[in-house]
Image (cartoon, rainbow, N blue to C red):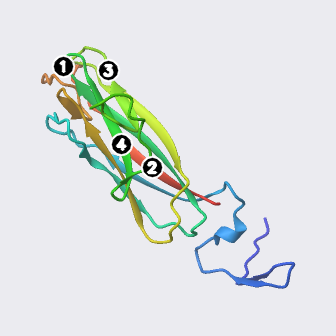
Amino acid sequence: MSTLKTNTIQAATGTTVSLASGHTPSGFVPAGGILQVKQSISATASSAFNSRTFTDIPGMSVSITPSSTSSKILVSTSLSWGSAANPYGGVRILRDSSNIAIGPNTSSGDTRATFGLQGVDNAYRLMCDNFQLLDTAVSTTSAVTYKLQWSTGVVLYLNRVNTLQSGNANTVSGVSTITVMEIAG
């Protein structure tokens, strides 16, 4: 097997590009290629949450520093949660403090979210909702933080079922993740 090592690559146009040790400049990754991946995993079971005001979901935030202003960020989420009777809620994805995608205002007083949580009437069932969103309006090379917030009119628990019973196989726990990928523009 051969190994090629170099500190300088000369492009066909005569432009010289220097490579920093351990880094792949975005100019060498084709548009649509993945430049970097960051993830936050929440494995902590939350206490009861019940609020019509959008509130940060514990552990569901991750920071990334784009290497180019033309980059896009693919946000992937997976929420494990439990509730009891008629569970539902709404989740928003934010870039720093800005909502990056929320549904239309369909009626006065409705809850505008990025995606909804809808479960089964079962205190022992752990639900999982997944969502992906491509943020095309990042336009910065400064660190940005993506986070999830939720709102509900019923009691929700992150990473656990509603009813906990010691030594019972119905007491299920899980993890939740938020993953961001920088995509070359």
Q: Amino acid at mark 4?
A: Arg
Residue at mark 1: 168
Disc 1 or 4, which lies upstream in sequence?
A: 4
Left/right placement of residue 136 relative to residue 2 reads left
**Residue 177, above or below 139:** above
Disc 1 or 2, which lies upstream in sequence?
A: 1
> Quick one: SS at disc 1?
loop
Q: Position of residue 139 (x, y in %)?
A: 53, 65
Distance, label 3 to label 2, CA atoms, is 23 Å
Looking at the image, is mark 3 or mark 1 nearer the viewer? 3
Q: Residue at x 39, y 31 (%)?
A: 129
The reply to whether callout 1 and callout 4 are in contact (CB within 8 Å) is no
Q: Residues within 10 Å of mark 2 (few under 14, many from 20)?
A: many
Residue at mark 3: 119
Q: Amino acid at mark 1?
A: Asn
Q: Position of residue 125 (x, y in %)?
A: 28, 20
Residue at mark 4: 92
Q: Quadrant of the N terminus?
A: bottom right
Disc 2 or 4, which lies upstream in sequence?
A: 4
Disc 3 or 1, which lies upstream in sequence?
A: 3
Q: Residues within 10 Å of mark 4 (few under 14, many from 20)?
A: many
Quarter holding residue 143 = bottom left
Distance, label 2 to label 4, CA atoms, is 15 Å
Tell which of 71 and 168 is nearer to you: 71
Looking at the image, is mark 3 or mark 2 nearer the viewer? 3
Residue 179: which numbered mark, if any?
2
Distance, label 1 to label 2, CA atoms, is 32 Å
Looking at the image, is mark 1 or mark 2 nearer the viewer? 2
Q: Residue at x 66, y 80 (%)?
A: 19
